[in-house]
Amino acid sequence: MATPAPPRWDRKMQQRLARGEEAALCELYDRFASLVHGLAYRVMGEEDAADQITREVFGYIWENPDAYDPKEGNLRSWIATLTQRQAVHRLRRCEAERIREGGERTAEQFERKVCEANTAARADFIKSSMPASIRATLDLAYLHRRDYRQTAAELGLTEDEARRRLRLGLQMLSTAMQAGPPADSASPSGRGSSR
């Protein structure tokens, strides 16, 4: 099966970044900074660390514009993957340092924390990426504790449609649990700097 062509905006943005257009980086930051910061915060649980990771991710993109290949998928997913890798790498580094300094956490507890943070970040990204109609159905059912009948009534749907949306949303979220452990790398992409 052929990979669908990426959106035109993604291709143009990659080209503009490769030409070194500062305005392109500003536009990219405006569009994706909240995504990057939110994912980084979800993994690290600290505002300062999320701010630093946000700067690192956009710095990496600026220094390595050719690291993104539009044929591999959309820019939003690629940036989310960079963020997740960088955040998990930083979390591993911080936790390893705490263990060396005599922290009470064992290596097993540490790996469990990394895995939980990574899964939560993937689930947040998946939820924010799903269609609004499915996200609204999940929110009513799980955040507001409505059953599928109440959800259907509040959204003006048939009960079958509410069940279908819930099932689809849960299937999408289940992929967060299926992903393997993150690549542990020094750079957000898993590759060294090209500049």
Image: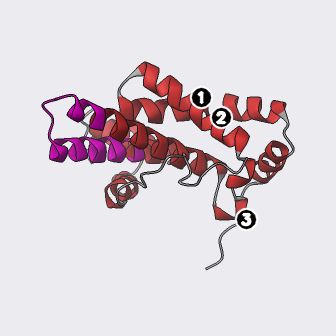
Image coordinates of residue 9 in percent, x first then y, are: 78, 48
Residue bearing mark 1:
55
Which numbered mark, 3 or 2, is in the foreground of this view? Answer: 2
**SS assignment at label 2:** helix
Residue 91, picture quadrant? top left
**SS assignment at label 3:** loop
Q: In the drawing, does residue 116 fall left or right of residue 91?
A: left
Which residues are the magenta region?
Answer: 96-122
For marks 3 and 1 on the same chain, the one whose residue lies earlier in the sequence: 3
Q: Residues within 10 Å of mark 2 (few under 14, many from 20)?
A: few
Q: Amino acid at mark 2?
A: Gly
Residue bearing mark 2:
59
Residue bearing mark 3:
5
Q: Amino acid at mark 1?
A: Arg
Q: Residue at x 42, y 52 (%)?
A: 184
Q: In the drawing, does residue 4 fall left or right of residue 136?
A: right
Q: Are marks 2 and 1 in contact (CB under 8 Å)?
A: yes
